[in-house]
């Protein structure tokens, strides 16, 4: 499993590309805006409160790419530079057969099917290129947008699993071979 060269992904409307330091302002917005972060709880050391935190976040992602620890894609509309959100695969198991997906999107672009399109690209990449067996998503029980996004795209709630670090999280899963034809 290697993330170099960086796997750019594209769909009809979107381009998923590597984060660059020039994205720092948007990263700061996405990781500190109250609407985007309403249901996201991060420990103090993972919070992004200043532009310098955002630059450090981007640099850490660059390191994580080189060491195959995780991969973050910046989401843009096709042929545009401006980032509108991010989507990532992280928390890989030691066997590299399971990973967790995470995502955020500028509220101006919500309810247009954007994250469904990005999620389909990343799920297909995870199963087809990384040969994952399962992708998981942890989401707050009150995060209706995220829960709907996941179920509409083939993820299934596993009610028997609990997030030991956050008891308001639900855990959704999608297995290789169960992705339907429109993904
Ligand atoms: C969760 C989140 C990523 C959802 O993103 P989104 O782009 O609005 O989600 P979708 O793209 O699937 O769009 C949802 C709605 O748009 C509709 N839609 C509109 N145009 C569409 C199109 N062209 N194609 C597909 N769906 C479209 C969908 O049908 C769906 O409506 P419904 O579910 O009410 O039927 C977004 O709300 C967000 O960033 N939230 C804050 C961050 C967050 O909570 N992250 C998750 C942490 S676990």
Image (cartoon, rainbow, N blue to C red):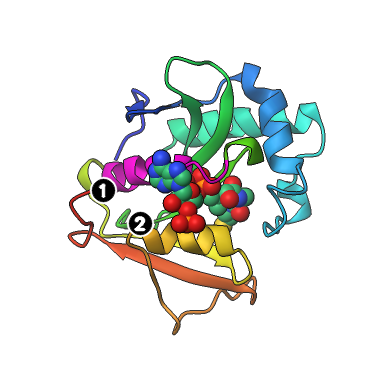
Q: Earlier in the sequence, mark 2 or mark 1?
A: 2
Evaluate if marks 2 and 1 touch, with contact meaning CB atoms under 8 Å apart: yes
State left or right for residue 39 relative to residue 10: right
Nearest the camera: 110 or 70?
110
State left or right for residue 38 relative to residue 114: right
Where residue 178 sits in the image (x, y, percent)?
21, 62
Where residue 115 sits in the image (x, y, percent)?
47, 44
Q: The N terminus is located in which quarter?
A: top left
Nearest the camera: 3 or 108?
108
Q: Residue furthest front?
A: 112
**Residue at screen point 76% across, 33% down:** 53
Q: CA distance from mark 2 to mark 1?
A: 8 Å
Say whether mark 2 is within 8 Å of ligand 1: yes
Q: Residue furthest bottom?
A: 160
**Residue at screen point 53% across, 72% down:** 170
Question: How many dots with numbers?
Answer: 2
**Residue at screen point 68% across, 47% down:** 36
Where residue 180 sits in the image (x, y, percent)?
21, 56
Q: Circle 2 sits on which residue?
A: 153
State left or right for residue 179 relative to residue 66: left
Q: Is residue 115 magenta?
A: yes
Residue 43 higher or lower than 31, as above or below: below
Q: Circle 1 sits on which residue?
A: 183
What is the span of residues highlighted in magenta in the rendered image? 110-126
Where residue 119 sits in the image (x, y, percent)?
40, 46
Report helix, strand or loop for mark 1. loop
Q: Residue furthest right?
A: 50
């Amino acid at each position: 499993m290697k993330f170099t060269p960086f796997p750019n992904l594209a769909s009809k409307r979107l381009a998923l590309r590597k984060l660059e330091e020039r994205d720092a302002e948007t990263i700061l917005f996405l990781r500190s805006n109250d609407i985007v972060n309403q249901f996201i709880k991060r420990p103090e050391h993972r919070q992004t409160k200043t532009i310098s935190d955002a630059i450090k976040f981007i640099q850490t992602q660059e390191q994580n790419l080189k060491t195959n620890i995780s991969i973050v894609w910046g989401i843009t509309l096709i042929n545009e530079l401006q980032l509108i959100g991010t989507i990532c695969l992280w928390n890989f198991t030691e066997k590299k057969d399971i990973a967790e997906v995470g995502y955020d999107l500028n509220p101006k672009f919500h309810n247009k099917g954007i994250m469904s399109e990005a999620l389909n690209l990343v799920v297909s990449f995870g199963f087809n290129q990384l040969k994952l067996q399962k992708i998981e998503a942890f989401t707050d029980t009150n995060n209706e947008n995220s829960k709907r996004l996941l179920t509409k795209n083939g993820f299934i709630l596993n009610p028997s699993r609990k997030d030991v670090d956050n008891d308001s999280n639900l855990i959704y899963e999608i297995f290789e071979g169960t992705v339907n034809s429109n993904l």
